Amino acid sequence: MKRAFYKPRLVTGVIFSLLFFCPPAIYAFEDVPIIPRCKSLELHEGFYPLQQQIRISITGGTSSEDQLKANAERFAVYLRKGAGLKVTLVGKGKAGESEIKLRVAPNIFEGKVVGAYRLSVDQKGIHITGADAQGVFYGLQSLKQMLPAAIFHQDDAAHREAFSDLRIGFVEIEDASRFKWRGFMLDSCRHIQTIDKIKQYIDLMALYKMNVFHWHLTEDEAWRAEIKKYPKLTSIGGYPGDRSKEEEFNGYYTQVQMREIVAYAHERYIKVVPEFDIPGHVNALLMAYPEYGCNDGAPLKMGEPGMRSFSSAAGRRAICAGKHETTIPFIMEVFDELQTIFTDGLFHVGGDERPRGNWEKCTHCVPLRDKLKLEDEHHLQNWFLNEVSERLRKRGIRSIAWAEHIQGGVPEGQIVQAWNKPSEVLQGVRAGREVINSYNRKIYLDYPANNANAEELNKHNRRYRSRLVSAKSIYAFEPVPGSLTPEERARVIGVEAPVWTEDIRMDRLDSKIFPRLISVAEVAWTDEKRKNWESFQRRLEKHAQILEALNIAYDRSDFIIEAK
């Protein structure tokens, strides 16, 4: 006899995707539609009914009680709005018609992995136990995914009626992440996004247990972070486009808005890492404050309004290392303000694609290079970034940089973000540094997913024609090179998928990110031996319905056409 894992009463005009299971002895591990795939999962015969009245009870130490209550309340709101259920929060021991029990019990977990959890459903109720409050939160995300996708509509009365007879199959889950860094990077410089859209992406990151939002806020093309001591960074640097028009080239985030994003992410156990890119990618900065550029610091010539207006006439520039007695204090004053907003102790300092010819011909940089007896400008860049990184370190902030600068040496304690060559991972770990693997040909979300849309490929991605990155190829990506020793393997702390927006306006952003970011999430969470593409495809069918319920305009072609 077949049975559904969750079994809502079907209402006319409302169709749910039902997952049908065989008898318990041959239940398939992959049939429960949870992404990322769990570390272990056992199904048992039977269902637990979720009645119209639900109680959520909390058991935890004083240090985690407030977080547990916040997690419980957000989940309660979700059930109320999405399914029309009556949900109350109670203390220990009280039972209602249906009960969801949340508790923190770190001693029952081995290895002390942050965010580990156990989820069980039996005749007594739904039980979620976390190694910490974050683990309870992740257990709730798995539970949320086990419910019908219609719940994600939220406030849609037409779908609520389907939840009057909701039952969840008996199950036991134990889960923990493979990597501690499960990241997504959003470029808000080339095209800017709304606060609401960023929050929507943070919600989806949380649903898929991702925990680092890398926010790219400064570039040649625009400066997006309000710095009150240096207002021209945004009043000039934030507006490369035509000021008479509403364009996605123009605008910036106020400090209030950035704090709002940080608080929203923290509620969902996501760290926010801002990027202030130095010494290259600084044309917007130098358009506002040219004195920090090389040689005489003459004003930059602005080109025609548009994304490249700060560099099309001036050429790409670098902040001046030779003027370090003024440029480094300026940089640290910018960090002074960012540090009050972004409180996770991690700052990205860029370090990639410094334009050649700036420092090499600078009347300040060349004498400094010679005075320090440095071999070349690569080593001067290492010196410059080390000066900045050391100042951050003394403030309790750890720096991250793109791996291109590795040829000049890596500052002490800095995290290396590998992106351009597979060898960068090897170089970083063998230099004794922790490494994030963001290899572009495997995980960049601005690269085309397939050849399905030739017009999109020709118009927006001509230079990437041979660089197809599908959901399937991402899923096959192994972040840790096999040649590493066990000690070296431990230094690969995770993965991060960037989306660069040179060619991506808001109306195309969803389809560039999804469904591929869901593949990234499973690569980041699930042990390599537990991954299974066929299982992922089956589970992804349910998650396509979730994306539809959330009005995410995902790339439907990536479900059926894969890179060759």
Image (cartoon, rainbow, N blue to C red):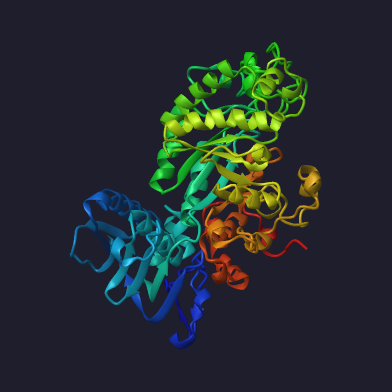
Residue at image position (65%, 62%) is 483
Q: Is residue 497 visible?
A: no
Q: Depth check: 203 or 158 in front?
A: 203
Residue at image position (60%, 28%) is 384
**Rendered image quadrant of residue 294:** top right
Q: Depth check: 359 or 270 in front?
A: 359
Check the picture and name the quadrant holding the C terminus.
Answer: bottom right
Residue at image position (27%, 66%) is 99
Q: Is residue 349 visible?
A: yes
Residue 161 coordinates in the image, percent (x, y): 40, 64
Q: Depth check: 62 or 245 in front?
A: 62
Residue 423 coordinates in the image, percent (x, y): 69, 51
Q: Is residue 379 above or below residue 421?
A: above
Residue 193 coordinates in the image, percent (x, y): 57, 37
Q: Is residue 412 above or below residue 374?
A: below
Residue 251 coordinates in the image, percent (x, y): 58, 27
State left or right for residue 538 relative to residue 358: left
**Rendered image quadrant of residue 356:** top right
**Rendered image quadrant of residue 499:** top right
State left or right for residue 70 relative to residue 351: left
State left or right for residue 392 relative to residue 111: right
Q: How many marks?
A: 0
Q: Depth check: 451 or 552 in front?
A: 451
State left or right for residue 364 relative to residue 105: right
